[in-house]
Amino acid sequence: GSESGHPLLAGLDPEQQLAVRAPRGPVCVLAGAGTGKTRTIVHRIGYLVQMGHVAPGQVLAVTFTNRAAGEMRTRLRALGVHGAQARTFHAAALRQLRYFWPRVVGDEQWDVLDGKLKLVGQAAHRLGAPTEAETLRDLASEIEWAKASLITPESYPEVAAKVHRDTPLPVEQVAAVYQGYEVLKNRARMLDFDDLLLHTAAALEEHPAVAEEFRDRYRCFVVDEFQDVTPLQHRVLDAWLGARDDLTVVGDANQTIYSFAGASPRPLLEFTRRFPEATVVRLERDYRSTPQVVSLANQVIGAARGRPAGSRLKLVGQRPDGPMPRFAEYDDEALEATAVARRIKELVEGGLPLSQIAVLYRVNAQSEAYEAALAEHDVPYLVRGGERFFARQEVRQAMAALRTASAAELAGDLPGAVRKILGPLGLTADPPQGGAARERWESLLALVELAEELAAEVEGAGLSRFVAELDARAEAQHPPTVEGVTLASLHAAKGLEWDAVFLVGLVEGTLPIQYADGDDAKIEEERRLLYVGATRAREHLWLSWALARSSSSGGRRRRRSRFLYGLIPDEHPAARVARSRGREGGRGGFGQTPPERCRVCDGPLIGTMAIKVGRCGRCPSDVDEELLERLRTWRAQRSKALKVPAFVIF
Ligand code: ATP
Ligand code: MG
């Protein structure tokens, strides 16, 4: 087609088009959440392919989670692009390694090690180092950090001391456990996840013939979420590229949430230093969220400290107005979860699809309360760290059972037979109430629905046809839709979006997480997590917290997250008046009066004193220190006087 009127450019703004149409070579898109970075790279791949600049099979796009990779594949398919690869770094490396392995290692068989804990435990035990569960977990993640940062056991003590690592044991001991772990792992002929990347890079670096073949096959590289790429992943990327520069990266330094694992936004921010001729595009229109959500996100990230130049972009909302973000406080976690479940049920009854709702939390252990509450309210859900459908245990079991039945030519017209075969695996007539069982059930039901689809499409289709269809889908990584509310950690939610998002458990000690306390860099990463969470919402955003873990631990009160200060419109005096008329009055009243704004930073003004002077007392630049101090003291006294913050419950 003709260049400028190409249909793939139609749904893009001028800056996005610039990135899409840039000639092959280095391209960098630096932009905030929801500005269309992922959309831009998907369209760029489609555009390059359709204009004949690159063959789809020559494209390798990498992203962060399996779910994000799946999302990218879905978007590519929707544009009619087939054959371009979109994978996580690990999945791409594993695939390549399988292919190259015989040539670089010979026919020796190695296995992929899922998780380090066991071998770390053995290594620690042999060295007489502490072996408590928590220490072992910390040691495993420390080893992961070291490997992702390309630090060997030998160099570990020196580097760790230099960067002031907060280590679980003295650095020499960590190094010894790290070394011991490597020995045990290699002896058992195992590769851990980091090894997959290390060996892929080494295969390309040390075997010119392998590198040549690879670089002949893949010519166009695209990396999403480039702000969270580790040095190890960079090394793989460099090995892929060789001397070429056909690389498109997109990212948002404000969404760096894996620096604990060795990631750094620096390569993103310094991309033009490496590629001076790069096309650089900045986007600031937010197409995902309502202006209300965008405003809250801007406030969250606007309060961040030490933001590097190049990350100080403000998002400008493009969508029509929506509801104000809501805040709610509960006495304990069970009450919080019940209220969220009830609210979700209302949304679903109001017509919002389950797949458009997510509950996001800081640590996975928080999901339990929500699983129970959602099950109780009969709302299907999926707990996802991004695990692929066809990799789930119940799906693998189901496929094996279907295959056996099909081989034995057990007949029966199609959905009914599938239902019967999957019955013993947990597909009961009624959905189970329990958490994991319910999830299993949903996966199995998705298979039955797929069989129903096939039966409707292909007359007389039997089991063998169904098994073939499933195999084809597994190969193409094209899972059926499993309907359910998403329960995910903030880390796993990166890059995704939902109409309604519940950010739960926003208390000190959880977000920010306890071990971040007193460490500015860690606190800032926690703040970015809240930014990532808030920017997942297209329309409805609820933020909640509970003052105690359980009703029985009532004595141990917790405080709501420090990041919420200044965000809650309910704290505006006008809203407080409405609240004082009681819950019902408050419900209609809060959020409707726009808070007045700080003269310096445009942040909200909280408290009559702040409103009087027109300064929030929180903004960093151009402040009158004395005035600030007065505000702080005043606020501290006031918050002591105001004992029970009676927030309006949803
Ligand atoms: P994140 O930083 O969270 O990964 P992102 O920058 O990758 O966000 P996308 O996921 O690509 O953003 O886009 C966010 C939403 O906005 C998507 O629903 C996308 O389809 C939509 N969108 C992007 N660009 C446009 C556009 N030009 N017109 C209309 N909608 C758009
Ligand atoms: Mg994205």
Image (cartoon, grey):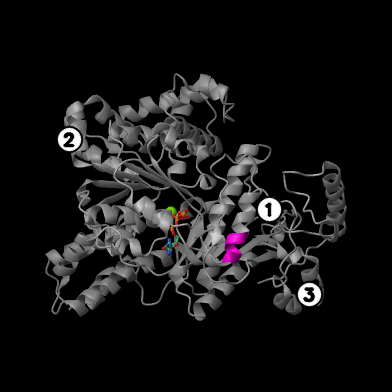
> Residue 335 appears at what percent x and percent y?
65, 67
Query: Which quarter shows the N terminus?
Result: bottom left
Q: Is residue 221 at all visible to an observer of this figure?
A: yes
Query: Would residue 327 be counted in the magenta stretch?
Result: no
Which residue is at 43% across, 71% downward? 432
| Residue 392 appears in the rendering | no
Q: Nearer the viewer, residue 412 or 353?
A: 353
Amino acid type of the residue that numbered disc 1 sits on in the rendered structure = Ser
Residue annotated with mark 1: 561
Which residue is located at x 21 percent, y 31 percent?
211
Q: What number of labels is visible?
A: 3
Q: Secondary structure at mark 2?
A: helix
| Residue type pointed to by label 3 | Ala
Q: Residues in magenta?
A: 291-295
Q: Residues within 10 Å of mark 1 (few under 14, many from 20)?
A: some
Three-letter amino acid code of the residue under disc 2:
Glu
Q: Is residue 144 above or below residue 373?
A: above
- Residue under circle 3? 578
Q: CA distance from mark 2 to mark 1?
A: 52 Å
Whichever of labels 2 and 1 marks the residue nearer the N terminus, that label is 2
Mark 3 packing: few (<14 Cα in 10 Å), some, or many (20+)?
A: some
Classify residue 611 as left or right of residue 260: right
Determine whether the residue tagged by mark 3 lies in a helix, strand or loop.
helix
Along the horizontal axis of the image, is 440 left or right of 526?
A: left
Q: Name the quadrant containing residue 583.
A: bottom right
Looking at the rendered structure, which numbered label has been put on residue 213? Answer: 2
**Magenta highlight on residue 294:** yes
Q: Earlier in the sequence, mark 3 or mark 1?
A: 1
| Relative image position of residue 635 (x, y in whole percent) | 84, 53
Depth check, mark 2 against mark 1: the one in front is 2
